[in-house]
Each structure stands twice: as structure tokens, then as C-alpha cells.
Amino acid sequence: MNLKPWKASVVAAAIVFLFSALTYTTGTGGTFHYIENPLRDALSSKSVTQREPDTRIKLIKIDSKSLEAIGQFPWDRSVYARLIDKVSKAKAIGIDVTFPEPSKDPKQDLALAEAVAKHPNVVLPVNFNFPAKQKANDLLEYDRIEVPTAAINAPKSQLAHINVFPDSDDKVRRLIVGLPEKDGSVVEAFSVKLANFALSDAEKVRWDADEQAWYRGSKEIPVNGRNQVITQYFTQPRQEKDLKTGYDSYSFSDVLNGKIPPQEFENSIVLVGPFTTGLQDEYMTPMSKAIKMFGVEIHANMVQSILENKFWHEVGKPLGIAIMALVVLLGAFLFERFKGKAALLLFIGMLVVYMGAFVIVNEAMHAYIPIFYPLLAIMLLYAWSIVGHYLAERRERSRVTGIFGRFVPKAVVDQMLASGEEVKLGGERMDISLIFVDIRGFTTLSEKLEPEQVIQFLNEYLDVCTKAIFKFNGTLDKFIGDGVMAIFGAPIRYDNHAEMAVRAALEMKKQTAMLEERLMQKLGFTVRFGIGINCGPAIVGNIGSEELRLDYTAIGDTVNLTARLESNAKPGQILISDNIYERVHHLFDIESMGEIKVKGKELPVTIYQVHAEKSA
């Protein structure tokens, strides 16, 4: 075994692994997060059926229509109080509008305070102000907290944070389940607080201070160091309700003016928030490359993820690195062993299989394994294998060219390149089958056609012969004028070489039918093959001048008898010897033609004619 290629492959695999692992572990989301995240989004995207929105979730939009009807934003806080009374039959009411400062008119704050006190299912927002850049990847630091003004007098049980923290590509994929305050208490997410109103006590989302973990019921939520968990989106940005998807949504002014009956919101989770670009509460999400999703829509989708207990997590970095190591080892081994089309199929297969594994793990285990970085490793290994094999082949071909610059059949060159051995003069005794083919009527054809036409028809006939020979693994030895000599069973040995020779002859006869018909229509006569086939021992090898030219061929009595059989074959006949007959008579429809006397043989030779396969 040649260890040099394997040493190079090991070095290449080590370099690829180190590069992939380094880029995977550098920064938040890895160096190539701008490829990793979209690719992950695409492979984990859900169909319309899979992401069917929950009909219990309803949106009340602070949209352009409402701004025209009610007036310039911000609105009188008593407007929200009136709205709360309109939808008070809902399970939960989330107001995604901050009230950090007291109103100029205390009556407005009093009206909202009374509505909040009257309806404990109302949730008001708390906003954490984060610095532009976080110091660490495993926690979220904040500068200050904006809570509703004391004039509203909202109890802590009705407060929840509305923060979302985009990934490094500025897309929101994660819910911050809770944010810790400096006194050690935890502020739940807006969506968590709202969803808990619809969940039974045994299924509610809760923070376990002793275990420092979040739970939904008895099941732990797989949050990261920042208390974030990957959630699912059930709607497209700004998607209206239709037969298949979208949350029920209503204009704020329509609800306030009574155009929408209060019963519409009974036992629902109602979210109220900005729904126009001018209010600057919109973010990019995996659901769209260009259109942003309003914050209230994001909260609605996160509420549904909590209700359906659908949370995803990323596998830890050690496991991700181990996966990449396994992929690199497998890829290096396979790409070293295979090349050409086999390597290309392996390359495509590995990509497809790994992406399939990603989808299966994502669906079955609700986990994200690294996707781009292992695929990058596979691509780099394949590129290395192409370059490595190309350079090795170039070196090998240069070596072969240096040994001889003379004509040899392609099969001989391929065999030598595969074996790595030097070309040997002379030959070896081998059991082979031979075909001799000659065109009957070629002289008459030459007399009736122009030379260019003769060459054209001759090339077509010889092309048929060549393709038939190659189809059944034969070696084209030479063209002899308007005839062909072919070897089966050398240089590559086949036990069934006699069968392959006969099949090649039948293929020639079959494929020449159209050519014969064309000649008959054009000239009123046609030409046909006469074919002789024999098998037995012969000397096969390189014969000729050691310094000038070699000819790979076969010599011996077996070859001579084959030529005699061909010369006795009538147009369209396939004549075989008794040697061939003994090996293939059970496979083909064969007719005995008796004995003939051939030149060079003292005794008559029994010959047979092959008609077709027995199955035919």
C-alpha cells in the first residue's frame, strides 16, 4: 500500500478540520454566521400546514387607519383604558406600548391605572436598555430599565419585558424568556406572561431559582446563557388572516368604535401594538429577506411557541466540533479512495445526507447541529481530493509517457496506470476470445459511391463495431481495412469472455439494421458483416520495436482460426468454433453448420452459426 497519498490526505484533513472548527467557534454564531443562519433557516423552515397559527391569538393594530381616526401618536392614555374595557373578556391583554413618563394630564394616567387594576389580565411592558455591544456571549447586560410610570400604579404581576435581541445577522430568532434584575428577581417576557394566562398551573412557564433553570410545566426550557431559546414563526410579516395562515387582526379604531363586537375577543390572547412603519417597532426575521415584522407580530408568534411547547436549542460547541471531526474523517477516507464520478457522487451524497441529518435532528430532537461548517469541510475536502488526484494522475501520466510514446490500446494504458507497473515487452499466455469482422460487398459499394461517401459509410460501420466491442468490455485491437479485430478477456481478465464476444457480435448485427436499410433504399443493394469468433490460448502482449513502436495484440493458432472463420462467414453470418460453442451453447440459439476445411489445419473444423439469445 502506498502511504504517500494517505499522508497528504491526513495533513489536508487536519488543516480542514482546524479551519472549520476555528471559524465555527469564533464570535457569536461563528465567522460565517451570515451563511450559517440563512442556511439553517431554509432547512428548518416549516410548511404552511406545520405553522398553522393559533386562532386564540388576536392582534389589535395601531395602524395608519387608527392614527387618522384617533390622532397623532402618542395617544391619550384613556384611549387604552377604553380599549381594555372593550376586550376585557379576553384571557390576556398585552399592551405593547411603553408609558415611562407620567402624562401631562393626571386624569389620563388615572384612567389607565383604573383599567389595569380592574382587569388583572392586562400586561404592560417593561423595556431593558442594552448597550450597543455586549461584553460576553453568554449573558445580556443592560444599562437601565424603563418601567411604566408610577402614576399608572401597575403591580409587578402585570409587568413583563418586551425586549428582543437580534442575532448577529440582525434577525430575531430567539425569545428572551426572562431578564434578571439587579435585586435577583426575574422579569418574565411579554409573551411568557401572556401565554401563562392560557396555560394551566401545571403547564405554566416558571423560573426555578434553586436550579437556575426555566421550565414549562415539568419540562426544562433549553435556554442559553442569555436566557434565550429559539422559537418558531407561524406567520409571515404583516400577513393578514386567510384560510390557511395569519392571525386575526383588527384596526385599533374599529375595536374602539364598536365596529368589532367584544365577543370576538372572548377567551383570546389579545396583543395591542404598533402596526405601521412610522412607529419604528419592526425587526428582521427568518420569515423574510426584505420585509420586517412588527414587534407585536413577533410577540404573537412567541406566545404560540410557548402554548405549543415548541422550543429549539443549539447543540453545545464540543458536540458540534465532534460532529465536524467525524465528517472530516469520513470525507478524507472516502475522497482518498474514490475519484472521478464516484468522488463527485460521494460529494453530493455527503452534502445531501448531512443536510438530511440536520433536518431529522431538527424535527425529532428540536436541536440545531452546525450546518454550514461541516458542509464547508466536505467542500474543502472534495476540492483537495480533486487537486490531489489531478496532480497524482499528471505525475503518473508523465511517468507513463516517459516510458513509451507509442500507440497502445486505451485499455492497456488504463490497466498500466491502475497497476503502477512498467510496460513489459513480449507477452503472456492467456485464455481469450477473439472477433474478426469484415464487411461483405464493400468492393461493390466502393465502385458505386464517391470516395467521401465510402469513407462516411465505412466510419459508420466501424463505429457500430467499436461501440459494440466496448459495450461488452472488449479491447479493440486494430482496424484491418474494412475489418476489425477485437480481443475479449485481455488485458483485463473476464471468466465469461466467450459470452461477451458473442453478445458483442449480436449487438453489431442488431445495430447495423438501419445502415443496411439506408443502403438498400439508396443503391438497391446492401452490405453486411461477416463475423468469426473463436476462443482459446494465445500469446497476448506488446509486440514490435522496443525503441520505436509497440503494438498490443494477440498471436497464435487461436487467432488464425478466428480469421479463417470470418473469411468463411457469409453476409450476416456469425460463425463460431466448437470451443466457443462448448462455453455458450446454453445461452444462445445456435445452429450446427457441419465441418469445413480451413487453411493450416489438417483436420476439418466443426463450425456453428449464432442466431440470437435463447430468451429471444
Image (cartoon, rainbow, N blue to C red):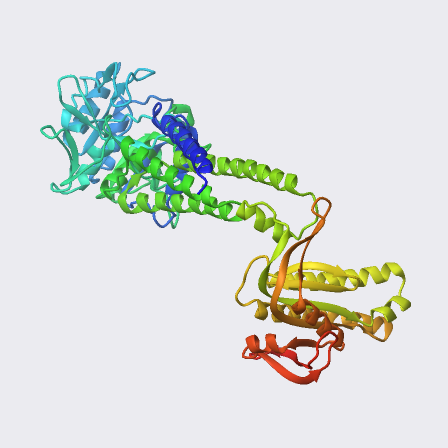
Using the image as rendered, state which of residue 197 and residue 600 is in the foreground: 600
In the rendered view, tell whether residue 39 sits above or below residue 438.
Answer: above
- Count of residue discs: 0
498 sits to left or right of 382: right
Residue 16 appears left or right of 415: left
Q: Residue at x 52, y 66 (%)?
A: 495
In the image: residue 451, left or right of residue 7: right
Figure quadrant of residue 589: bottom right
The spot of residue 176 in percent (x, y) is 25, 29
Residue 257 visible from this viewpoint: no
Residue depicted at x 16% and y 36%: 215
Residue at x-position 55% and y-position 75%: 583
Q: Residue furthest left?
A: 210
Q: Quadrant of the N terminus?
A: top left
Q: Is residue 346 visible?
A: yes
Of residue 400 and residue 544, the one placed in the foreground of this image is: 544
Task: Decide if residue 158 is on the left or right side of residue 281.
Answer: left
| Residue 254 in picture, x, y percent from top left | 34, 36
- Give the quadrant of the C terminus: bottom right
When the figure is inspected, residue 528 is found, relative to residue 146, above or below; the finding is below
Q: Where residue 280 appears, x then y in whole percent?
A: 39, 23
Residue in the foreground of this view, choosing between 604 and 315: 604
Q: Position of residue 286 (x, y in %)?
A: 39, 35
Question: Which residue is at the far front?
Answer: 602
Task: Using the rendered view, name the quadrant where residue 506 is placed.
Answer: bottom right
